[in-house]
Amino acid sequence: LYRYQTLLDAGIKVGLSSDAPYGPLNPWQVMQSAVARVTAEGEVIGARDRVTPEQALAGYLSNASAPGGVVRRVAVGEPADMCLLTRPWSDVKNDLSAVLVSHTVVAGEVIYSRTED
């Protein structure tokens, strides 16, 4: 639970990742932690270092070789790397730990497809 906003304010580029097995593997839980900064007991820790949901998402969308750099975009002629959600971003951004992924595409290949429960 590093000082995310403090690092950004200092001009340091920040890329997000999992700390598994010491933290959650789920990237949506990691992003929610960066946004809420709450302990398991519900206590806020380092409120000044909270970031917006958009900043947390951008932390995962940069190129792995340049963490915290330019956010990758889907573009014509480029292999798709994307995650499709079951609901619009505007509906899920306030509770990222509850995000449900519909499909995950890496290098243009579907590697995950959610089946209905």
Image (cartoon, grey):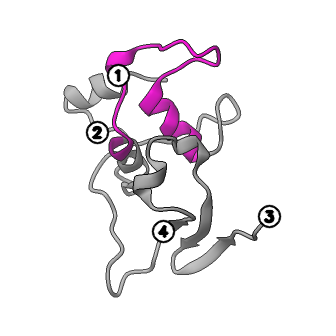
- Mark nearer the N terminus (1 vs 3): 1
Image mark for residue 49: 1
* Cα–Cα gap, marks 4 and 2: 22 Å
Dot 2: what SS? loop
Dot 3: what SS? loop
Give the residue type that dot 3 points to. Asp
Instruction: From the top left corner, tell me how far across and down residue 85 is, in percent.
Output: 54, 63
Q: Is residue 104 left or right of residue 113?
A: left
Q: Which residue is mark 2?
A: 13
- Mark nearer the N terminus (2 vs 1): 2
- At 45% from the left and 31% from the top, the residue drawn is 34
Q: Is residue 58 left or right of residue 82?
A: left
- Mark nearer the N terminus (4 vs 2): 2
* Cα–Cα gap, marks 1 and 3: 37 Å
Residue 64 seen by the camera: no
* Cα–Cα gap, marks 1 and 4: 27 Å
Q: Is residue 28 above or below residue 110?
A: above
Q: Which residue is mark 4?
A: 82
Mark 3 or 4: in front is: 3
The answer to the question of whether label 1 and label 3 lie on touching residues, with beta carbons closer than 8 A, is no
What's drawn in magenta, residue-wise?
27-55
Quarter placement of the C terminus: bottom right
Dot 1: what SS? helix
* Cα–Cα gap, marks 2 and 3: 39 Å
Mark 2 or 3: in front is: 3
- At 33% from the left and 42% from the top, the residue drawn is 55
Q: Which residue is mark 3?
A: 117
Categorize mark 4 by other alpha carbons within 10 Å: few (<14), some (14-19), many (20+).
some
Instruction: From the top left corner, tell me how far across and down residue 111 is, in percent.
Output: 65, 72
- Mark nearer the N terminus (1 vs 4): 1
